[in-house]
């Protein structure tokens, strides 16, 4: 039991650490807007993992992935939402940058919601959870639903820790380069590129 959970924790750490669209988005977003909003983006992404854990635990994921029409609908919704966010970033004038935390409650909720929706509307994450979690069931005596939530909790904690490290790394870039207009413009276009890339990956992935 312990060896399985340790193996799962190591696998989760390596997956969170591996270069990918999520951690690259966290890096560039935090580098542009600062670690506070980067933190709320992480909370949104991790909260989405809780929803996926629930879907796997109660068989919703298996039901969705067994129906190619439902997967296609989810793909289109996810891709359209990401393109919508990319357009919002394009039309923005760095309005989040340098706003004091006490005036930032609306933006905190906004970036939390963006992270949450980016996660739960991604069918690739849904399929990943469905394929990954069942292989680490660790007990013949504990209710499988409880085991899925334990695995989900470990995965969320490990992912949160890795992403927090990324946010603190990016804050160094933010604090030293935020005064340069070319810096904010560059990160703006990197964010747009990452969002569009994720949307394309979702849209053209196999069901």
Image (tube, grey):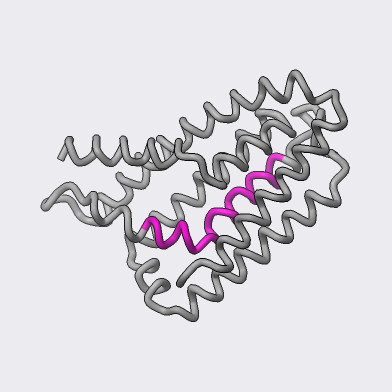
What's the residue at 62%, 35% (across, down)?
27
Q: Find out whether residue 123 is within the magenta segment.
A: yes
Above or below, comparing residue 14 to residue 165 in the picture = below
What's the residue at 17%, 50% (across, down)?
142
Outermost residue, left side: 140
User: Could you tell me which quadrant the N terminus lies in?
Assistant: top left
Could you say where residue 191 lies in the image, as x and y percent from the top left?
A: 71, 45
In the image: residue 32, left or right of residue 130: right
What's the residue at 33%, 64% (across, down)?
58
In the image: residue 115, left or right of residue 110: left
120 or 124: nearer the viewer: 124
What's the residue at 54%, 70% (across, down)?
74
Residue 93, image quadrant: top right
Q: How many numbered markers are drawn?
A: 0
Does the magenta stretch mainly form a helix, a strand or a loop?
helix
Could you say where residue 150 lies in the image, as x and y percent from the top left?
A: 30, 44
Q: Which residues are magenta?
A: 108-129
89 or 60: nearer the viewer: 89
Above or below, comparing residue 125 to residue 40 in the picture = below
Q: Find out whether residue 58 is within the magenta segment.
A: no
Could you say where residue 5 lies in the image, as x and y percent from the top left?
A: 23, 39
Above or below, comparing residue 176 to residue 4 in the picture = above
Above or below, comparing residue 6 to residue 58 in the picture = above
User: Could you tell me which quadrant the C terminus lies in?
Assistant: bottom left
Residue 24, image quadrant: top right
């Amino acid at each position: 039991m312990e060896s399985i959970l340790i193996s799962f924790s190591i696998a989760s750490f390596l997956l969170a650490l591996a270069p990918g669209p999520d951690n690259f988005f966290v890096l560039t977003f935090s580098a542009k807007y600062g670690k506070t909003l980067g933190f709320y983006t992480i909370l949104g992404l991790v909260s989405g993992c809780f929803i996926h854990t629930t879907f796997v635990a109660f068989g919703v994921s298996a039901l969705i992935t067994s129906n190619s029409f439902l997967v296609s609908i989810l793909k289109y919704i996810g891709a359209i939402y990401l393109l919508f966010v990319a357009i919002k970033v394009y039309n923005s004038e760095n309005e989040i940058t340098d706003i004091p935390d006490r005036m930032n409650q609306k933006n905190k909720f906004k970036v939390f919601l963006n992270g949450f929706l980016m996660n739960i509307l991604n069918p690739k994450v849904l399929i990943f959870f469905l394929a990954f979690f069942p292989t680490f069931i660790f007990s013949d005596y504990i209710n499988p639903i409880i085991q899925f939530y334990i695995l989900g909790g470990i995965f969320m904690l490990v992912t949160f820790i890795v992403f927090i490290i990324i946010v603190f790394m990016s804050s160094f870039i933010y604090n030293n380069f935020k005064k340069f207009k070319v810096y904010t413009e560059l990160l703006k276009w990197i964010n747009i590129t990452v969002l569009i890339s994720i949307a394309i990956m979702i849209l053209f992935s196999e069901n």
